[in-house]
Image (cartoon, rainbow, N blue to C red):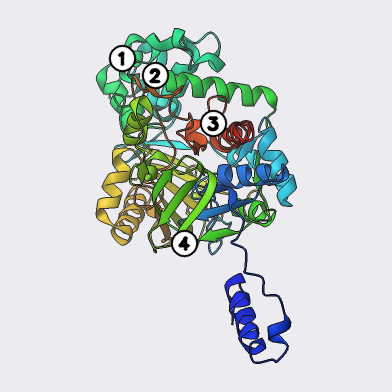
Amino acid sequence: MEFSRRNFALGAAGLGLASLTSPLYAAKKVNKPRPPAMLDVLVLGAGASGLQAAWMLEEQGLKVKVLEGRNRVGGRIMTLLDQPGYPEMGFNSMADGYGRGIDVASRAGVELQEVGARYRLGKPPMLWFDGKPLTREEWARHPANPFPDSMKTMMPGELVSRVVAQHTRLKDWATWNDPANAALDIPLHEFLRAQGLSDAAIQLANNISPYYGTNSWDVSALMLEYNDGFVKAQFAAGPQSLAVKGGNIHMATGMAKLLKGDVILGKEVIAIESGPTSAKVWCRDGTTFEAKRVISSLPFSTLRHVKIMPGLSGAQAEAVAQLPYQPLSIAFLTASAPFWEEDGYAPGMWVNGPVGTVLPQRYGATPEEITGFQVQARGEMAHYWDRMGKDAALAMVVSQIEEMRPAAKGKLKGAAYFSWCKEAFNGGDWAYFGPGHVRRFVNEMAKPAGRLHFCGEHTATGARGLEGALESSERVTLEILEAA
């Protein structure tokens, strides 16, 4: 029998019944069991931000419990431990400037390894345009190249980030959410057009494989300028890219083990009520939990399906209902032989067709060994893959690569597939802001609503990725402590 507090209580009750038959019972004073002490904080979501907030609050002496809808911890940290090289389906690596992330890894007892050199090893990814391989020089002269003359040598997959980096309007990226910059919160499409790109150029450079959004109209240029500033700050801090040896998921499980309170899996939250002295949470399985305060680290794409009482209002309610999340689907392929050595082309590919971006994974005994290929579909292409379904999408990706590269025929296998849009507790990968969202949402959406507080990367204002998630944990911890 699995030991639990409930089993222990039932056993104690049995002993109590036995004592009723004793003649000494009448002389004993019977104390009524006290109700369990109310939790100080209930954290919803066992991703990096939720786990970190729980740990920080426990360090201040508060009694905390964590609920997670999935049957695993980690949130957007997800490693395929059953595949060669332990490919990451979510968070990949952290830079030298991720001080919070590096500290968490140390506390979680995991070893970080430098992986940036592995991505830079070998030939750079090659452009495959309409099924044909093109070098940078060939692309610059290609009659179908729609880029302005000053940008002809830029590859489609690099153009948007380089244009944003060269023409950012932000004087200080850290002030991106200052109301003074509200006029910059325009569609990326308008920003790129102002730099001389045609609609055809924007379609090729952005909409086929957008880093944020589904196309250039549904993402804010200010969002990309903020991200550009954050990335530049990371490069200034140092050249390394760090990942957990054996898979990033070990950092999340290590974080969970540091907690004194329970981390309860399989608890999908369906309702939250913030009352005058406490907050109550209902789960789909019928269980309820109560605490003095509740922290939601749930993505807004999940929170919008949770009943919140009393309801949110204003810009915060709009943000929960509208904040979009990045469509991203990932195929992982294994290769039985190094076909890239046979055809002489770079193993990595950027394709203007339905294959998307092909990234070699170098996580073998040596950096030179390719353990598989991560193939990413973003934006509308991710939806296209998802409509096909896992098996058909994997088969399509393999056949497309084989058609472009005959040397790969019979040597590629679709080993795994994961869709963040189809993931029930995320509904997309990372959050992004559409035009107008920065000025309307960013400074309002994370404010406490009664006894309900918010954290998660989507609520961070000074960092992105894992570092943003951990930044948000610091903010919400201070809110709780100040409110106590």
Q: Amino acid at mark 3?
A: Arg
Q: Residue at x 59, y 21 (%)?
A: 232
Q: Earlier in the sequence, mark 3 or mark 1?
A: 1
Distance (Cα) linking label 3 and label 2: 16 Å
Q: Position of residue 429 (x, y in %)?
A: 42, 42
Observer able to see residue 213 = no
**Toward the viewer: 447 or 8?**
8
- Of the residues shown, which amino acid type is indicated by label 4? Gly
The numbered disc on residue 190 is 1
Label 2, residues with CA under 10 Å away: few <14, some 14-19, many ≥20? many
Discs 1, 2 touching: Cβ within 8 Å: yes
Please state which amino acid type lies under the numbered disc 2.
Answer: Ala
Q: Determine which residue is flagged by label 2.
A: 221
Q: Does the rendering let one see residue 271?
A: yes
Distance, label 4 to label 3, CA atoms, is 28 Å
Give the class, few, some or many, for how many residues have Cα within 10 Å of label 1's Cα (few <14, many ≥20).
Answer: some
Indicate which disc residue 266 carries: 4
Q: Count the numbered circles shown.
A: 4
Disc with the residue nearer the chain's start (3 vs 2): 2
Frontmost residue, 138 versus 278:
278
